[in-house]
Image (cartoon, helix red, strand yellow):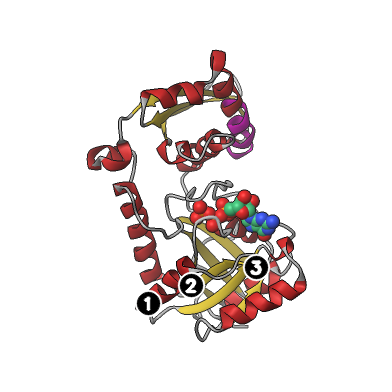
Amino acid sequence: MTHRAGFVTFVGRPNVGKSTLTNALVGEKIAITSSKPQTTRRAIRGIVHRPEGQLIIVDTPGVHRPRTLLGERLNDVVQTTLGEVDVIGFCVPAGEKIGPGDRYINDQLDAYPKAKKVALVTKVDTTDRAAVAAQLLAVDALRDWSAIIPVSALTGEQLDVVVSELIALMPESPQLYPDDAVTDEQLEDRIAELVREAALEGVSEELPHSVAVTVDDIVRRDDKALTEVYINLFVERESQKGIIIGKGGQRLQQIGARARAEIEPLVGQQVYLSIRVKLAKDWQRDPKQLGRLGF
Ligand SMILES: Nc1nc2c(ncn2[C@@H]2O[C@H](COP(=O)(O)OP(=O)(O)OP(=O)(O)O)[C@@H](O)[C@H]2O)c(=O)[nH]1
């Protein structure tokens, strides 16, 4: 049997379900998701193993018109990734009409002639069969795709088809990662992302973009089965500190509890989580601060 392996990335407007699809295919949460657009900030790699091949999924930020330096850097991440992958999966939700944003991204794909292009009609569970069929036709008219696949990351419908079609498009290659690898993300980065995800839940539209999280220190205690995790959570304005912390520190406590529940299985033991909320004034527009925060 020929073994195939290679890289795929999903592109599409913010919020079309790229990260959720990545997690569903990998079978483990490696990318955080939220109902707020533009949650993903870095290229994250998830790995899918099958006897016939290996897929390395590079999850990228959604493409959008940049309004800040952070926005520009996120678009750069996408451009670099697109130039390096074997297959590009263009995502459009089943229940939303194809608009200028989708067309803009589709046009951009011409700049990457080496990559094979697949269309994924996502979130098919949100609409009926007739609407899905209509969307498949609309997507077909955009370009000559190597495949067009309807899928739901939520119900799992057609996930196996996505995997086998993508592997079939990969070059012949031995395994690129060991059998047990699900991601090449560092533990520290995964922890920071889980805290950011917890912080994004239940906040208003504007705040999510202002939140950045770094891990200060991870200490595995010798005297007991406990890992201490020290987190810095940055906001851009003094007023945002109050929103994150909440009355009597209540919101911050909830954020900590939610994040801890996800971090403990990753670390494999009980976690003490300390989150310090700090001000990094206008960090999204400041090159020096962006650098310090890892962008
Ligand atoms: N019903 C349904 N909802 C979905 C599905 N996939 C994703 N969603 C929801 O759509 C929203 C956005 O999903 P994400 O995976 O964060 O979208 P994204 O494209 O990665 O977004 P960015 O990181 O902003 O680019 C979340 O609220 C998901 O729960 C699906 O198959 N069915």
Question: What is the x, y in percent for residue 35?
Answer: 58, 47
Residue 275 within the magenta-colored segment of the rendering: no
C-alpha span from label 3 to label 1: 25 Å
Residue 164 in view:
no
Residue type (three-letter) at the residue carrying disc 3: Ala
Task: Locate ligand 1 by image quadrant.
Answer: bottom right
Q: Which mark is residue 178?
A: none
> Residue placed at 62% from the left, 70% from the top?
121
> Residue placed at 42% from the left, 70% from the top?
104
Q: Quarter of the image holding residue 248? A: top right
C-alpha span from label 2 to label 1: 9 Å
Question: Are discs 2 and 1 less than 8 Å apart at CB?
Answer: yes
Above or below for 272 versus 75: above
Question: What is the x, y in percent for residue 5?
Answer: 52, 73
Above or below for 51 versus 254: below
Answer with mark 3 or mark 1, whichever residue precedes in sequence: 3
Mark 2 residue crowding within 10 angstroms, few (<14) / some (14–19) / many (20+): many
Answer with mark 3 or mark 2, whichever residue precedes in sequence: 2
Magenta region: which residues?
256-266
Q: Nearer the viewer, residue 267 or 18?
A: 18
> Residue placed at 43% from the left, 55% from the top?
43
State the residue position of label 3.
94
Q: Which mark is residue 88?
A: 2
Q: Nearer the viewer, residue 1 or 44?
A: 44
Mark 1 residue crowding within 10 angstroms, few (<14) / some (14–19) / many (20+): some
Question: Are discs 3 and 2 less than 8 Å apart at CB?
Answer: no
